[in-house]
Image (tube, grey):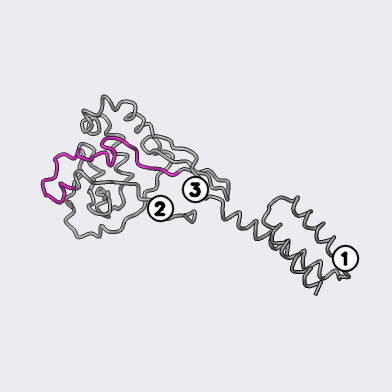
Amino acid sequence: MQVLYLIASSLSALILYSNYADTTYFYEFHTFLQLKLNNFTCNSWLQSCLYLNFLNQRALLSESNEYMLERRKFISYHSSPWEEYWFENIGILQGKICSTILTEQTNQLRAYLELLCTRYFPPHDNWCIIDDGYAPLWFNIANKESLDITFEKPLPLIVDATLIEPSIPYQQHEHILSKFTYVDEVTKETYNEYIEPLVGNLFFPLQKCLHPAPIIPFYKNHYVSFRGWLTPPPVVRGD
């Protein structure tokens, strides 16, 4: 009975001490166990079992600590040069948002719109869709003379516009895209996730700036509320 009590009390101490990640507690437990066992005639098998149980609890604790590490721990936010320009000059630009976007910043606008394209339609690869999940915009990337973008489907053939492909930004897009920087505490990797810049009317650069403005009621609503966004790729970090 005393031996059973010893085992029970030792295992209780094992669980208690395994909740700490400091090696000091390991030596304290080992000393405690030796003192208890010295009062009884016990074989090495019992000591080994208790010791292995202790090591197993320590391993489980270490594994649980890994699950507590963050895969997307926020570090910082970085505005793109395009976004910074609007922040620094909003007092001047707020009275001429559309003219600035459509005449002074056409290079940034076109680069951004092409990045937002979620689907092309061979052999009509000059047309792509910018989709907000409700009412897609059709953008002619081949027309460099004017901004050829419309809610009306321009293609004569029947196409499936429901398949949305992810946007894949790269470092070369940092002149237009803002970004969040994160650290993966498991792998220690630092990485960036890109986000739409806050320019123009914020939600979408061409919000209230499409010309000519649509006259069909359904499209008139999206003329104001359309939100083109970067379609993210599938999650790769388990979150």
Q: What residue would you read off at disc 1?
A: 39
Q: What stretch is highlighted in magenta?
A: 193-221
Secondary structure beneath disc 2?
Answer: loop
Check disc 1: other Cα within 10 Å, few if <14, some if 14-19, many if 20+.
few
- Ranked by sequence position, the earlier of labels 1 and 2 is 1
Q: Residue 20: give x, y in percent of width and height.
A: 68, 53
Q: Residue 216: give x, y in percent of width and height.
A: 11, 49
Check disc 2: other Cα within 10 Å, few if <14, some if 14-19, many if 20+.
few
Q: What residue would you read off at disc 3?
A: 72
Magenta stretch: includes residue 112: no
Q: Please name the amino acid that badge 3 sits on.
A: Arg
Magenta stretch: includes residue 200: yes
Q: What residue would you read off at disc 2?
A: 233
The secondary structure making up most of the magenta span is: loop
Quadrant position of the N terminus in the picture? bottom right
Q: Residue at x 74, y 51 (%)?
A: 23
Q: Which of marks 1 and 3 is in front?
A: 1
- Ranked by sequence position, the earlier of labels 3 and 2 is 3
Whether residue 146 sits left or right of residue 61 in the image: it is left
- Ranked by sequence position, the earlier of labels 1 and 3 is 1
Report which quarter residue 84 is drawn in.
top left
As rendered, which of 204 and 4 lies closer to the eye?
4
As rendered, which of 68 and 221 lies closer to the eye?
68
Q: Please name the amino acid that badge 2 sits on.
A: Pro
Whether residue 104 sits left or right of residue 63 in the image: it is left
Whether residue 135 sits left or right of residue 215 in the image: it is right
Q: Residue 142: give x, y in percent of width and height.
A: 25, 43
Q: How far apart are marks 1 and 3 (CA)?
A: 52 Å
Q: Please name the amino acid that badge 1 sits on.
A: Asn
As rendered, which of 201 and 114 lies closer to the eye?
201
Check disc 3: other Cα within 10 Å, few if <14, some if 14-19, many if 20+.
some
